[in-house]
Image: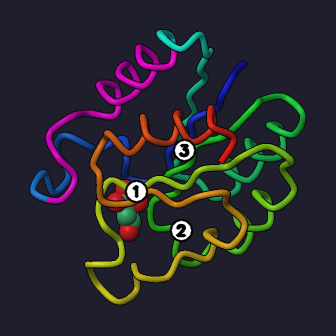
Amino acid sequence: MTILIINGPNLNMLGKRNPEVYGTETLEDIEKMIEGYADEKGIRTEFFHSAHEGALVEKLNEAYGKYDGVIINAGAYTHYSYAIRDAIEILKVPVIEVHLSDIHAREAFRNISVIEPVCTKQIAGFGSKGYLMAVDAILEGK
Ligand code: DQA
């Protein structure tokens, strides 16, 4: 079993970016933590980060038929990218939407996720632990 973990714009700045909202771990720390957790469960992981909407769409297209599940934190694209929404809709495997912060308890523009209707599950507000919860959700086939 192999899962793809995608992180979008500004998540490469974790550690420096609004630590009171997003915590102090870097993206590398989080990726290592996910890798270790998945490894214990016998799952292989691949990671992808880009700030570019098109690159995220292309990666999702390439993921077709290649992975057993996808975890995506699309950053701000979550709130308005219909291109990413459509790319997720094509996939036949569970796609779990993750947000470090609780997008429902912040600015109004963050309350809406245009990808939520095409994702299997949304996990928001649990910090980096949310990615581990997403690994479990894929395992449970939710
Ligand atoms: C985020 C929430 C988004 O609103 C924001 O634009 C991000 C990070 C989160 O992980 O909490 O870049 O997806």
Task: Name the secondary structure under disc 2.
Answer: helix
The amino acid type of the residue labelled 2 equals: Thr
Picture residue at 65% right of the left edge, 48% below the top: 142
Instruction: Describe residue 60's horizontal placement relative to residue 103 as left or right.
Output: right
Closer to the camera: disc 2 or disc 1?
1
Q: Residues within 10 Å of mark 2 (few under 14, many from 20)?
A: many
Q: From what the image shows, is residue 70 above or below residue 30? A: below
Q: Earlier in the sequence, mark 3 or mark 1?
A: 3
Which region is colored magenta? 21-38
Ligand 1 neighbours mark 2 (CB distance < 8 Å): yes
The amino acid type of the residue labelled 1 equals: His
Q: From what the image shows, is residue 14 above or below residue 3? A: below
**Whole-percent x, y for residue 112 in the image:** 49, 82
Ligand 1 neighbours mark 3 (CB distance < 8 Å): no
Ligand 1 neighbours mark 1 (CB distance < 8 Å): yes
Query: Ligand 1, what quadrant?
Result: bottom left
Q: CA distance from mark 2 to mark 3?
A: 14 Å
**Whole-percent x, y for residue 24 in the image:** 14, 40
Closer to the camera: disc 2 or disc 3?
2
Picture residue at 56% right of the left edge, 28% below the top: 47
Task: Name the secondary structure under disc 3.
Answer: loop
